[in-house]
Amino acid sequence: MEAELIIKSIMGLIALLALLIILLFFEPNKEKKLKKTLPETKAPIKEEKNNPKSELLSKDIELNTLVSVIKNKKSDAKKLEEALDLIIKHHGSVHKKLGLRPHPDFAIYEDVLFTLCRHPNANKDLIINFDRELGKLNPEYKQEMNEAITKGLNSRGI
């Protein structure tokens, strides 16, 4: 009788644990939350019909799109400059540091700086202006930005 009660209790606890694990990974409002946040990150720039602009301005201003332009080795200096300006304008501020460690989101900006330094069509003005503007918006990350630029310039084969 006692063994049967213990077995039923264990089975009940296992079922409860399985239910809690399922609820942990299942978020019913996840799609609604995603739809609410997407319009904020994908704000297109309005253009005048008579003033033809670059391809970048007609696309959604999403950080991943702008980073892909910078990573594309075929992007010319004008596209790079537009992408960097849009990054500063719409995604320029980084979260505060976590103690002495940089926020995990800063890894994207380190990658952008590193890739920009290695890009064949990037010039010193683009790198310096982007570093300066990003440094103004995020002064606490200045040391990490300098390290990323140094690594990028050192890895660039001259």
Image (cartoon, grey):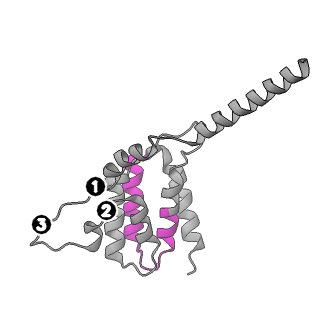
Q: Cα distance, mark 3 to mark 2?
A: 16 Å
**Label 2 near label 3: C-beta < 8 Å?**
no
* Badge 1 or badge 3: first in the primary sequence: 1
Q: Cα distance, mark 1 to mark 2?
A: 6 Å
Q: Cα distance, mark 1 to mark 3?
A: 16 Å
Image location of residue 87, percent across then percent down: 36, 58
**Label 2 near label 1: C-beta < 8 Å?**
yes
Q: Nearer the viewer, residue 75 or 81?
A: 75
- The image's mark for residue 66 is none
- The picture quadrant where one finds residue 14 is top right
Element type at marker 2? loop
Q: Which residue is mark 1?
A: 43
Q: Which residue is mark 3?
A: 48
Q: Which residue is mark 2?
A: 60
Q: Nearer the viewer, residue 31 or 96?
A: 31
User: Is residue 100 shown to the viewer in this render?
Assistant: no
